Image: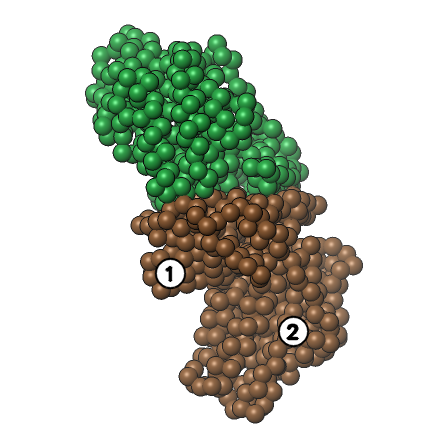
Chain colours: A brown, B green
């Protein structure tokens, strides 16, 4: 049960000039499901990426980090079912063999292929079945393959996640289309489970590298479902240059600003889609912290609230047991926090009420207001720390019976 | 449903010379339940305590910190139902009024009384009802009141938690009896929800102050249920001196070692009881980390595993989805962790198997062994980091439907 999330109609997903996608059923872990995706990029495309900081980072992530600096990426290959993480040297060999097999089929070098895996950790990748599935995925490559690809990268996701947007840059229409997957083990650190965003703008590699980091920070790095940072998080930004605009090379230009805003907007939509489809989610929660000394302490507070199982279960129950929010703020790790200067509001799209101030419950707060607001599926906790000018926002979901059910049953 | 936890028979709880306890029904939050406890100490008793580091620390915690250095504590007063946290200045006034009322009744000064509260945060303490209940609790003071007190401090606990032990010190029998409460919002930081341990040994204040910190570190500060650090955590160690032993003043003496070992043993039993009665718990999990460079990094790894909702739900399901443990180790925050040097074992009291080494699944591991071991309710995850000589152990429980149910329903 996703929260206010609708999979776009296939016709809403605009092809990006220079990108073709194909999927196949390779039987990686289960039969009769699409579990293999190939994304082919036109020559000259530029690619930038950010990856998990988990020390147990998966074999494909390690191979991506080795191949990406080469700078001439021509294809991405993504499998679900097995994460190829916690697989040691054999896992690395499997990831490299996957790249080599795809490279042969499309006539490029193995280092021009980036591999991605998502699924169960600590199990060997059935690389023979994966390689055997590649010809079918390659045969099916097409420019309007985004909808199928969005489905083929799903694991415990209940809905496919994809967003398109068009902007005008230098008199040319630039198209951005992105897909993402993920519902659990979501607390990205510099990247998310899997996100792929392609555009046909011409933009310098240096700006693309900066943009992928900025967009990740504001989107995938600002969400959490359960606080578990995955071993396989990857977010890839592609610019094929096929739109025909004059190459963007100036970070101060209006063209860059237009592209940057569109990339950030699509990234946030893809990241929020993961939270809306969070395992067992019934509420979509925005934790907005302001008035901090720096962004880092605002994020600490936001994540403490967003990760608290007590806060998340209270939201699941629509119970305004808001003292739990204060407790989480209190243990967030700001040693010199002055709780008497702190203010907390609870809101939904229709109304917002001040809940706490002067170190306690606001005199104006009545529980009926809290209970009424919490009936809504879209909720905002706004926290003013009263100690500076920095702010940060984190998106998360509630914690329900179904989260336990999904994660107690996954694999079985 | 607690995991291998039995409330002791009243006769198993030995009175501690110099300590009397009384309880009453004060109707703090709900009618017809014992929710008020008074613990009276003989003149000359020494008391040491550690308290929550939560910045939203409750009013009674603040009053305890102010009264404790006075050094002549004669009584403790504990209410359940309302935590008196997030209550600002009125909350402090209520805590002080509670101390003053009890002090008048037993003929001591208000600063000789320590107040404790546990229950819902952000709600005002009904201090009139509390004060009205005090005479009944005082009238019922008796040396064998430990069993009743263990029940009267419960909130979502399903079983009362109490432990007694006797040791011989300087030819005298020294008795230790302790009680604790807590089942959720359990991730103590320098203390736990509520723990009270009294002994009749004669021991210097300096050693008692050191001992309460050491015992807390090895017991209450090494458990977690849900990672939520409470606003009200307090652990109090009392030494009445009534046993008649020569006062212990030397940390290097055999007498101190005997007392220290007994206090630590009882503290660990009380702390583990909280985990065994963790909200919704079906498994008792020991996370033992060794081979770290220092104790702090071992604790980081242990807590990352102990807090992971994915690990906890897999244990609930008895599913050896052990890659989730590797993922948690990987994001624990040790930036230079060499995953190829790491080894992980899964065990129960009957057997233990090597699960992971060389950055992946151990060649000798078969999933049948993991599945068999996980059927047991007492499980150990042993993690060897392979980078030093430090170690740390954390105790936790699994994450079940009932955790969500309890916390979605609490208050209602």
Residue B258 visible at all: no
Say which quadrant the C terminus of chain A sits in.
top right
- Residue underneath mark 1: A291
Question: Residue B353 versus residue A5: which sits nearer the camera?
Answer: A5
The mark nearer the N terminus, 1 or 2, is 2
Q: Residue at x 57, y 45 (%)?
A: A319
* In-image side of B290 versus B211 (left or right): right
Say which quadrant the N terminus of chain A sits in.
bottom right
Question: Residue B67 versus residue A37: which sits nearer the camera?
Answer: B67
Question: Residue A409 versus residue A325: which sits nearer the camera?
Answer: A325
Q: Helix, strand or loop at disc 1? A: strand
Mark 1: give few (<14), some (14-19) or many (20+) Cα within 10 Å: some
How far apart marks 1 and 2 lie (CA) works out to 43 Å
* In-image side of B118 versus B89 (left or right): right
Chain letter belonging to callout 2? A
Identify whether A215 is placed above or below B68: below
Q: Residue at x 26, y 9 (%)?
A: B244
Q: Residue at x 31, y 17 (%)?
A: B106
Chain letter belonging to callout 1? A
| Spot occupied by residue B28 in the image (x, y as percentages of width and height) | 48, 29
Determine which quarter of the picture holds residue B190.
Answer: top left
Q: Helix, strand or loop at disc 2? A: strand
| Spot occupied by residue A186 in the image (x, y as percentages of width and height) | 56, 55
Residue A310 visible at all: yes
Q: Residue at x 42, y 84 (%)?
A: A252
Q: Are marks 1 and 2 in contact (CB under 8 Å)?
A: no
* In-image side of B34 versus A336 (left or right): right
- Residue underneath mark 2: A39
């Amino acid at each position: 049960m996703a929260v206010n999330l609708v999979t776009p109609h296939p016709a809403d997903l605009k092809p990006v000039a220079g990108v073709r996608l194909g999927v196949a059923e390779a039987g990686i872990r289960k039969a009769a499901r699409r579990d293999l995706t190939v994304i082919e990029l036109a020559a000259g495309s530029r690619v930038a990426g950010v990856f998990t900081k988990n020390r147990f980072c998966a074999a494909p992530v390690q191979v991506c980090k080795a191949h990406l600096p080469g700078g001439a990426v021509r294809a991405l290959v993504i499998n679900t079912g097995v994460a190829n993480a916690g697989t040691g040297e054999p896992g690395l060999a499997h990831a490299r063999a996957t790249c080599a097999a795809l490279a042969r089929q499309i006539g490029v070098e193995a280092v021009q292929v980036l591999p991605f895996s998502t699924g169960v950790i600590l199990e060997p990748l059935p690389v023979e079945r994966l390689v055997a599935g590649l010809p079918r995925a390659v045969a099916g490559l097409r420019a309007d393959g985004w909808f199928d690809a969005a489905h083929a990268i799903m694991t415990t996701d209940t809905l496919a996640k994809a967003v398109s947007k068009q902007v005008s840059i230098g008199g040319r229409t630039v198209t951005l289309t992105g897909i993402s997957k993920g519902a659990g083990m979501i607390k990205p650190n510099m990247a998310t489970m899997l996100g792929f965003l392609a555009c046909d703008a011409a933009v310098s590699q240096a700006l693309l590298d900066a943009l992928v980091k900025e967009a990740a920070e504001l989107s995938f790095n600002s969400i959490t479902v359960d606080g578990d940072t995955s071993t396989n998080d990857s977010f890839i930004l592609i610019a094929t240059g096929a739109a025909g605009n004059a190459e963007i090379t100036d970070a101060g230009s209006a063209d860059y600003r237009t592209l940057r805003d569109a990339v950030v907007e699509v990234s946030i939509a893809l990241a929020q889609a993961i939270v809306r489809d969070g395992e067992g989610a019934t509420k979509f929660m925005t934790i907005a912290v302001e008035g901090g000394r720096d962004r880092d302490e605002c994020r600490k507070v936001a994540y403490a609230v967003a990760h608290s199982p007590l806060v998340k279960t209270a939201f699941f129950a629509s119970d305004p047991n808001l003292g739990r929010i204060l407790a989480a703020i209190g243990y967030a790790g700001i040693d010199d926090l002055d709780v008497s200067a702190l203010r907390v509001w609870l809101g939904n799209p229709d109304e917002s009420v001040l809940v706490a101030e002067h170190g306690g419950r606001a005199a104006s707060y009545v529980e009926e207001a809290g209970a009424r607001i919490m009936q809504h599926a879209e909720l905002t906790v706004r926290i003013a720390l009263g100690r500076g000018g920095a702010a940060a926002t984190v998106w998360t979901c509630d914690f329900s019976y179904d989260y336990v059910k999904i994660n107690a049953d996954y694999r079985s």
